[in-house]
Amino acid sequence: MKLLDHDDFGIVYKEMDNFNNLVVFYNGEFIKVNVNRLFLEAQAKDLYPEGYDLETLSVN
C-alpha cells in the first residue's frame, strides 16, 4: 500500500476496523492509517507466489 501522508510504501498487517482504519507495517513499526489515506499499488497475490508463508513477514 502506498501511504499518501508519507509518500512511501507499507504492508497491511491488520484488516480494516469499524472506523475504516488499517494497521500497516511501515518503517519498522505498526501504524494505524485510514483507508482514505492509502492507495493500493499491488495486491498480495501479485507480490507473493502461491503457498508463500506470509507469517514470515511479521515482526515479533
Image (cartoon, rainbow, N blue to C red):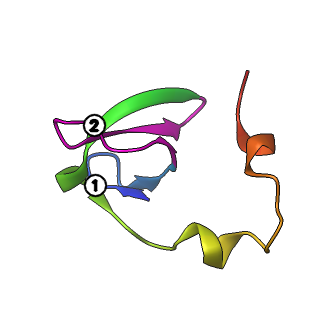
Q: Position of residue 5 (x, y in %)?
A: 26, 47
Q: How many marks?
A: 2
Q: Residue at x 20, y 43 (%)?
A: 20
Q: Is residue 53 left or right of residue 48?
A: right
Residue designated by label 1 = 4
Q: Which residues are magenta?
A: 12-28
Q: Magenta stretch: residue 39 in it? A: no
Q: CA distance from mark 2 to mark 1?
A: 19 Å
In this picture, residue 9 sits left or right of residue 19 = right
Please state, as top left, top right, bottom left or bottom right, where the C terminus lies in the image. top right
Q: Which residue is mark 2?
A: 17
Q: Residue at x 74, y 51 (%)?
A: 54
Q: Residue at x 34, y 31 (%)?
A: 32
Up the image or down, 27 lies above or below 29; here it is below
- In the rendered image, which quarter is residue 16 located in? top left
Q: Is residue 59 above or below residue 52?
A: above
Q: Quadrant of the N terminus?
A: bottom left
Question: Measured from the top left, where is residue 36 in percent x and y?
Answer: 17, 54
Whether the magenta-drawn stretch holds residue 19 is answered as yes
Which element carries disc 2, helix, strand or loop? Answer: loop
Disc 1 residue type (three-letter) = Leu
